[in-house]
Image (cartoon, rainbow, N blue to C red):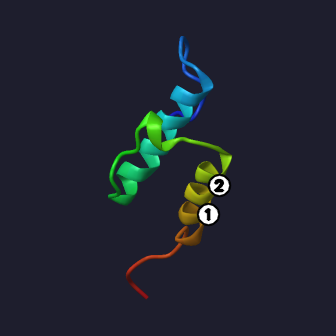
Amino acid sequence: MSYLLRAGTTYQATALINLNLIRERAGATQATLGDLTGIDVIRKERRKELAFENKTGGT
């Protein structure tokens, strides 16, 4: 998995690709460019990702 800017894409398109990689791994629905309406949306996604980092269903 590479989270770098992909050649020939915009920063917004790259952000969407990276966001969807994380959402796919988490079993969440995929986002669209229309979902990326501002920095607050990205910050909320980041908070959700970090909230469950290093937590497992086991002991």
Distance between the alpha carbons at the discs numbered 2 and 1: 6 Å
Name the residue at 52% across, 33% down. 2
Where in the figure is residue 58, as x and y percent of width and height?
39, 84
* Image disc number at residue 28: none
Q: Is residue 51 left or right of 27 when viewed as pictured?
A: right
Query: Which residue in the protein does label 1 denote?
Result: 47
Name the residue at 67% across, 46% down. 39
Judge by depth and name the residue closer to the eye, 4 or 9: 9
Circle 1 packing at 10 Å, graded few (<14), some (14-19), many (20+), is: few
Judge by depth and name the residue closer to the eye, 1 or 37: 37
* Image disc number at residue 43: 2
Whether residue 41 appears in this view of the structure is yes
Using the rendered view, name the quadrant where residue 49 is placed.
bottom right
Quadrant where the C terminus is found in the figure: bottom left
Q: Identify which amino acid the numbered label 2 is placed on.
A: Arg
Q: Is residue 55 left or right of 40 when viewed as pictured?
A: left
Element type where label 1 sits in the image: helix
Q: Identify which amino acid the numbered label 1 is placed on.
A: Arg
Where in the figure is residue 32, as x and y percent of width and height?
41, 38
Q: Are marks 2 and 1 in contact (CB under 8 Å)?
A: yes
Circle 2 packing at 10 Å, graded few (<14), some (14-19), many (20+), is: few
Whether residue 1 appears in this view of the structure is no
Q: Vertical placement of 1 versus 58: above or below?
A: above
Q: Vertical placement of 4 versus 7: above or below?
A: below
Where in the figure is residue 31, as x and y percent of width and height?
40, 44
Where in the figure is residue 3, as x and y percent of width and height?
56, 35
